[in-house]
């Protein structure tokens, strides 16, 4: 390969590496504020994702209804025994998107706001002789690697972030769940029990020994996926088994994707100078549920806010404020979900008890309120007390572990 060369002497206010929900949101917000932005993304990359987005995301980020390929009205939790619990969405519906089109719409919205788009693969983070940050990338069309300069760099390039590994202390030490899904042609409503308005979540050890599997409706298509952090566990075999057990074995395969999903937020998101992380690169995925779109877009928005302050004041401490604000708002949720995943997903016996708990009306009400509105419920001491007592009974084996037949 020919030596890399500087694409332009211009210094961008921000170069954003990664055009998923986090990077595209940051690019849109900064460009809308009049900042010069370069959004660097490798085309053709689609993250495996169930595609569920709550009403809070739709409202906060002005997502048009045309992007929703389905609206789920209920979720079905399936225990190791095969018994299930149906949880009707309380207070709304869950929007479903196809990441192939959703992410591209977000990138195009950023471009319309004034961000420049480049199709390329990030290779190195450098500095020029003046100490200015330099991003090196390989363009899609090939040829010599190119370099661009930036007053600030936002790393939004996923769980195995190369930006984080090269520019952030401890940035290359993220523990991950590996996810794989297949997008298939949806069967007709009712065929083999398929419901186009229902998300199905399988807490069964043979499908995932430490996470879960899913079938999420996408209108004409559906996402059939699984996640696991256990080395040697075959995600593809698990999907093959799930499709066979649910009558989807013969459904047309449209595409398939796999990627790592971080298990917890990194302890540090910035380098104290001119680089900050957002989305999966910062570890912003909810434990237990694996939900990432809302948290990624929020991370992109928070990063953009900090970068705007940094550009105005030239005070790098503004970058550290991103993680502080983010974790103050959502750190408790992440902690609780992390404890849940660590305890309830460890064995089929515990998974059976977890699904049984989901049959409780207090659990359902508080769960949906927290998910739809992205906040912990207002204090309801009696409900929390009832849940605590039931949870304790399950732990001590004093309560039936099997859910009722749905």
Image (cartoon, rainbow, N blue to C red):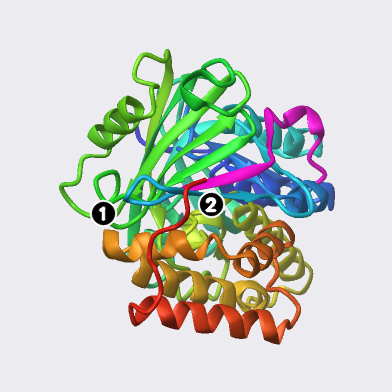
Q: Residue at horizontal 71%, vertical 57%? A: 372
Q: Relative to 77, is 97 above or below?
A: above
Q: Are marks 1 and 2 in contact (CB under 8 Å)?
A: no
> SS of the residue at dot 1?
loop
| Number of residue marks | 2
Residue matched to label 1:
209
Q: Is residue 378 left or right of residue 146?
A: right
Q: Relative to 143, is 389 above or below?
A: below
Q: Residue at horizontal 52%, vertical 17%? A: 187
Residue 225: which quarter of the image?
A: top left
Q: Is residue 102 left or right of residue 131?
A: right
Residue 350 seen by the camera? yes
Residue 128 seen by the camera? no
Q: Position of residue 297 (x, y in %)?
A: 66, 52
> SS of the residue at dot 2?
loop
Residue 156 has which mark?
2
The magenta stretch spans residue 67: yes
Q: Position of residue 315 (x, y in %)?
A: 69, 77
Q: Position of residue 69 (x, y in %)?
A: 68, 27
Q: Residue at horizontal 31%, vertical 25%? A: 244
Q: Earlier in the sequence, mark 1 or mark 2?
A: 2
In this orientation, which residue lies closer to the viewer: 351 or 105?
351
Q: Position of residue 320 (x, y in %)?
A: 60, 77
User: Which segment did they paint magenta?
Assistant: 62-77
- Mark 1 surroundings: few (<14), some (14-19) or many (≥20) residues within 10 A: some
Residue 173: which quarter of the image?
A: bottom left
- State the separation of the CA atoms marked 1 and 2: 29 Å
């Amino acid at each position: 390969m020919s030596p890399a060369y500087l694409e332009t002497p211009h210094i961008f206010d921000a170069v954003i590496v990664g055009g998923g929900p986090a990077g595209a949101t940051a690019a849109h917000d900064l460009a809308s504020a009049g900042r010069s932005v370069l959004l660097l993304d490798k085309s053709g990359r689609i993250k495996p994702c169930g595609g569920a987005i709550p009403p809070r995301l739709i409202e906060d980020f002005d997502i048009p209804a045309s992007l929703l390929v389905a609206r789920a009205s209920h979720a079905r939790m399936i225990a190791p025994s095969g018994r299930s619990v149906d949880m009707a969405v309380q207070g709304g519906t869950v929007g479903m998107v196809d990441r192939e089109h959703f992410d591209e719409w977000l990138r195009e919205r950023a471009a319309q706001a004034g961000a420049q788009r480049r199709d390329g693969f990030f290779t190195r983070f450098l500095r020029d002789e003046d100490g200015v940050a330099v991003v090196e990338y390989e363009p899609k069309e090939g040829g010599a690697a190119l370099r661009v300069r930036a007053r600030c760099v936002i790393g939004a390039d996923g769980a195995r972030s190369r930006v984080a590994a090269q520019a952030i202390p401890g940035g290359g030490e993220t523990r991950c769940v590996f996810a794989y899904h297949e997008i298939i042609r949806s069967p007709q409503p009712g065929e083999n029990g398929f419901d186009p308005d229902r998300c199905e979540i399988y807490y069964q050890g043979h499908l995932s020994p430490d996470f879960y599997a899913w079938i999420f409706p996408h209108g004409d298509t559906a996402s059939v996926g699984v996640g696991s952090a256990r080395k040697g566990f075959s995600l593809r075999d698990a999907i093959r088994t799930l499709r066979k057990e649910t009558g989807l074995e013969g459904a047309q395969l449209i595409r398939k994707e796999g990627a790592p999903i971080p298990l917890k937020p990194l302890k540090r998101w910035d380098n104290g100078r001119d680089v900050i992380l957002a989305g999966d690169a910062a570890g912003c995925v909810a434990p237990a549920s694996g939900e990432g779109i809302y948290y990624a877009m929020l991370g992109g928005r928070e990063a953009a806010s900090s970068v705007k302050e940094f550009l105005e004041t030239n005070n790098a401490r503004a970058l550290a404020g991103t993680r502080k604000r983010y974790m103050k708002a959502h750190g408790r949720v992440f902690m609780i979900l992390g404890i849940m995943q660590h305890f309830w997903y460890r064995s089929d016996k515990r998974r059976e008890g977890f699904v049984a708990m989901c049959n409780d009306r207090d659990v359902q009400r508080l769960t949906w309120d927290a998910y739809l509105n992205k906040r912990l419920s207002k204090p309801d001491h009696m409900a929390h007390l009832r849940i605590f007592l039931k949870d304790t009974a399950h732990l001590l084996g004093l309560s039936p572990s099997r859910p009722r037949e749905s």
